[in-house]
Image (spheres, rainbow, N blue to C red):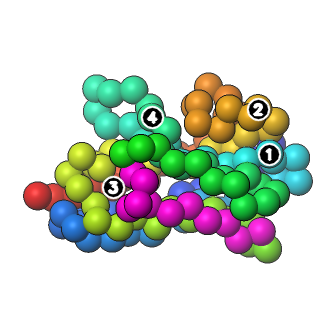
Amino acid sequence: QVQLVESGGGLVQAGGSLRLSCAASGRTFRVYGMGWFRQAPGKEREFVAAIRWSGVSTYYADSVKGRFTISRDGAKNTVYLQMNSLEPEDTAVYYCATNYGSRRLTSPDEYDYWGQGTQVTVSS
């Protein structure tokens, strides 16, 4: 299995920035891709961004394009989510997850292991 630990969440003002990190351990050699998702109270978990473990392919939700950037550090088995120009609508618990072969990297149903989440709160 893969263990995931997220960090970097916090409280910021609108227009501010945060960088989330997700450190993976375990059998990461079988991972096809990793993704970031978020969930606000009373709402469904939604896709934010994803990246292929091998290669540079990335995917973004329309709501975060141009503001968020996903990246990876293979040597550290870590993925990052740089979040700029944050808006109150970005307030949610952010989760990272690993995918073991599904090519539908934008669907939370296709991910196998999840971190515990990190809270991001954006004040207006």
Magenta span contains residue 113: no
| Residue located at (44% from left, 48% from top) | 94
Outermost residue toward the left in this view? 124
Distance between the Cα atoms at labels 1 and 3?
Answer: 26 Å
Question: Which residue matches tag 2?
Answer: 102
Residue under numbered circle 3: 120
Which residue type carries mark 1? Tyr
Q: Are marks 1 and 3 in contact (CB under 8 Å)?
A: no
Around disc 1, counting alpha carbons within 10 Å, would you say few (fewer than 14), some (14 to 19), or many (20 or more)? Answer: some
- Mark closer to the chain start, 2 or 3: 2
Residue pointed to by mark 1? 32
Find out whether the residues at labels 2 and 1 contact each other: C-beta distance under 8 Å. Answer: yes
Q: Which residues are magenta?
A: 64-74
Whole-angstrom CA distance, mark 4 to mark 3, is: 14 Å
Q: Is residue 77 above or below residue 32?
A: below
- N-term-proximal mark, 4 vs 3: 4
Write down the residue under mark 4.
46
Residue type pointed to by label 4: Glu
Q: CA distance from mark 4 to mark 1?
A: 20 Å
